[in-house]
Image (spheres, helix red, strand yellow):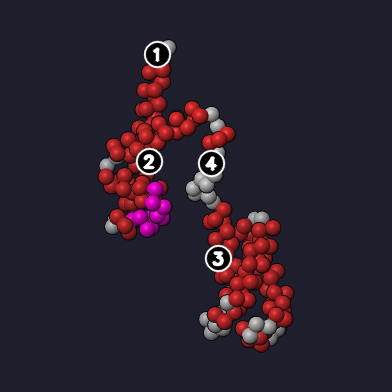
Amino acid sequence: MRNDKALISNLKNKDEAALSQLYDAYAPAIYGVIVRMCRDEQQAQNILQDTFLTIWEKAHQYNPEKGKFYTWAYRIAKNKTLNFLRADKKLIQTEDLSVYKDKTQTVKSEVDTFQLKGYLNQLEPHHRKALELVYFNGLTHREAHEEMNVPLGTFKSYIKQALKKLKLSYDKAIVWLLIIIEVIR
C-alpha cells in the first residue's frame, strides 16, 4: 500500500512529484467515474485535467480526518462533471439565428409571444405565479415552492394544471384559426 499521507503532505507543500504520483495512482479510477457520467472521452480527459489542477490548487483544504483522499478527489471530479453537464444544456438561446429565416417567421413568433402572454393572463394568479417563477425566473421547483410558501406537491400540481390549461387554450386558438382560414378562402 502506498504512503498517501507523505504524498499528500508533499502535495500541500507544492511538490510536483507528489502530484504526479497521486495522479498515477488515482487518475484511472477518477477518469472512469467522469467518463461514465459525461459519456464523452475528450471531455472526460479535460475534466480529469481540471480536477487535478483543482487538487493542486486546493490541496491545503484536504483534511484526512474528514475522509480519504480518493473520496475528496472523487467529489471534486463529480462536481466538475456535473457542472459541465449543466453548462452543456443551454437554457437560453445565445445566437441570433433569425438572419437565416424568412422575415415572416419573426412576425409569427411575435404574435405567438403576444398570444402566450394573453393566455398566461387568463390563468389563475397562483398558476401564473408558479409558471413565472420556474420558466421565466429560472427557479427550481424546490426554490419556487418555498417562494410561494406552499408544499412542493401542491406547487408541482400548480405547474401541471397551468400547463394543461395553456395547452387547451392553444388548441382552441388553433381550431379558431383553422375555422377563420376556411371562412376566408
| Residue hosting label 2 | 163
| Residue hosting label 3 | 79
What is the distance, in whole Å, between disc 4 and disc 1 at their CAs? 35 Å
Residues 29 and 48: in front is 48
Q: What crowding class fits label 4: few (fewer than 14 Cα within 10 Å), some (14-19), or many (20 or more)?
A: few
Task: Note whether residue 25 is visible.
Answer: no
Q: What crowding class fits label 1: few (fewer than 14 Cα within 10 Å), some (14-19), or many (20 or more)?
A: few
Mark 4: which amino acid? Asp
Horizontal side of 146 relative to 56 (left or right) equals left
**Residue 12, quarter of the rendered image:** bottom right
Q: Earlier in the sequence, mark 4 or mark 2?
A: 4
Mark 1: which amino acid? Ile
Q: Is residue 142 above or below residue 183?
A: below
Q: Earlier in the sequence, mark 4 or mark 1?
A: 4
Q: What crowding class fits label 3: few (fewer than 14 Cα within 10 Å), some (14-19), or many (20 or more)?
A: some
Residue 179 in picture, x, y percent from top left: 38, 18
| Residue hosting label 1 | 184
Task: Specify start and end residues of the magenta stretch as a single range.
Answer: 136-145
Secondary element type, mark 2: helix
Horizontal side of 90 relative to 120 (left or right) equals right
